[in-house]
């Protein structure tokens, strides 16, 4: 399965800088001699969070609209100056809890710097490539935070096996997780291959200790089988499938959308076929659901056998 990421439009969003993160919009990123050329930015994703964070001196903008404009300028400048530009949602409650846990003053820039590059939160980072903030990138940042929390949960269930926390010496455990991850990716691939060309959304839920693991991903699939999906959504789907298969947890998945030649915008006669398939897992494998399923308001009939899909 190939992942295609479309290059979005130009614009940006701000809340904190990268190698030496500065959380004020007028900041101009600059290269640091001898350091990796990367820039990390925290982004306030709504007006309420902006109002809450102003008390910490995060930025000088008078309102959220001006903040977005300043952030866009900052990110556009960073793209020209740094080899890598990444961003993550700056969540005020997460930040306050982080400061409380580590005994930091939220009004200090050093506290914000540590929060942005906190290793357990690296799964929330997204590469920035010039996307329009409000129209495309900000919603992805919000989803990336939610996805990141789920990834941390899945990694905890797998004893650190997803992101190396299990330790380099436990090779048997690492192989076990890798094998489950590959099996999960293959399950997802077969779901898409069986569906054929079209525009779909996968909704996935696995019942796990500590709460359900949930994932969702939008997929655009061409006639040649190449699928376009955001990398972070693909990672989440595979991680949730991995945890379910490795720990033999019950789960349900629904793939729904419209079948048709996705790349050309539909068949010549404009005919798209609505479709919705459901699968369930008792743990070791996925199979067509035994009965019709409704997941997150989406109704689906039992899906096709994944074993018959090449």
Image (cartoon, rainbow, N blue to C red):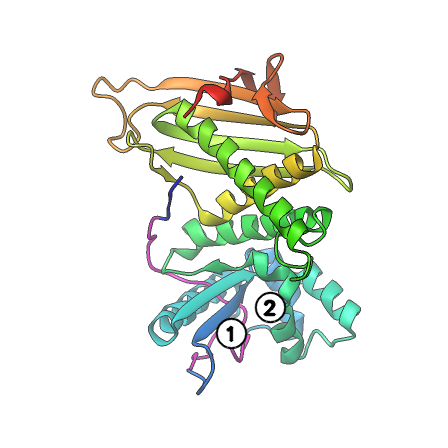
Tell me which residue sits at (50%, 22%) in the image.
306
Q: Nearer the viewer, residue 251 or 127?
A: 251
Residue 259: % across, % down: 36, 22
Q: What residue sits 67% from the left and 46% below the top? A: 154
Say if residue 298 shows up in the picture: no
Q: Which residue appears at 36% of the width and 27% of the height?
A: 198
Q: Is residue 10 magenta?
A: yes
Tag 1's secondary structure? loop
Residue 168's place in the image compared with 20, above or below, is above
Crowd class of label 1 (few under 14; some 14 to 19; many from 20; radius 10 Å): many
Quarter of the figure with the C terminus: top left
Q: Hey, which residue is sitting farthest top in the picture?
A: 291
Which label was assigned to residue 7? none
Start-end of magenta stretch: 6-30
x, y percentage for residue 101?
Answer: 78, 68
Q: Would you say the residues marked 2 and 1 are in contact, meaning their CB atoms lie under 8 Å apart? A: yes
Q: Is residue 205 above or below residue 132?
A: above
Front one among 308 and 62: 308
Q: Residues within 10 Å of mark 2 (few under 14, many from 20)?
A: many
For residue 265, which quarter of the picture?
A: top left
Q: Position of residue 247 (x, y in %)?
A: 70, 37
Q: For residue 239, say whether it is visible.
A: yes
Q: Residue beneath label 1, please?
A: 18
Magenta stretch, main secondary structure class: loop
Q: Quadrant of the N terminus?
A: top left
Above or below: residue 180 compared with residue 302:
below
Left or right of 114? Residue 64 is left
**Pointer 2 residue:** 116
Please name the residue shown 49% across and 54% down the image: 138
Q: Position of residue 50 (x, y in %)?
A: 59, 62
């Amino acid at each position: 399965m190939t992942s295609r990421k479309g290059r979005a439009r130009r614009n940006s969003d701000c809340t904190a800088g990268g190698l030496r993160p500065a959380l004020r919009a007028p900041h101009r990123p600059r290269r640091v001699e001898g350091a990796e050329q990367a820039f990390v930015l925290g982004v306030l994703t709504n007006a309420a969070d902006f109002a809450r964070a102003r008390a910490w001196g995060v930025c000088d903008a008078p309102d959220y609209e001006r903040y977005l404009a300043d952030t866009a300028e900052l990110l556009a400048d960073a793209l020209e100056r740094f080899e890598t530009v990444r961003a993550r949602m700056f969540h005020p409650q997460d930040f306050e809890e982080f400061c409380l846990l580590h005994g930091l003053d939220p009004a200090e820039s050093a506290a914000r710097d540590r929060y942005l590059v906190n290793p357990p939160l690296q799964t929330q980072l997204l590469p920035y490539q010039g996307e329009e903030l409000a129209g495309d990138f900000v919603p992805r940042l919000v989803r990336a935070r939610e996805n990141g929390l789920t990834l941390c949960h899945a990694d905890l269930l797998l004893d650190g096996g997803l992101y190396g926390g299990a330790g380099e010496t436990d090779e048997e455990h690492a192989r076990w997780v890798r094998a489950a991850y590959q099996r999960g990716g293959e399950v997802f691939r077969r779901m898409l291959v069986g569906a054929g060309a079209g525009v779909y959304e996968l909704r996935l839920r696995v019942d796990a200790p500590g709460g359900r693991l949930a994932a969702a991903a939008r997929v655009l699939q061409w006639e040649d089988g190449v699928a376009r999906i955001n990398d972070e959504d693909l990672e989440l789907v595979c991680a949730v499938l991995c945890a379910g298969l490795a720990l033999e947890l019950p789960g349900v998945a629904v793939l729904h959308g419209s079948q048709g030649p996705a790349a050309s915008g539909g068949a010549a006669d404009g005919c798209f076929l609505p479709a919705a398939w459901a699968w369930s897992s008792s743990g070791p494998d996925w199979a067509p659901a035994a009965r019709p399923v409704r997941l997150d308001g989406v109704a689906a009939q039992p899906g096709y056998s994944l074993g018959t899909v090449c």
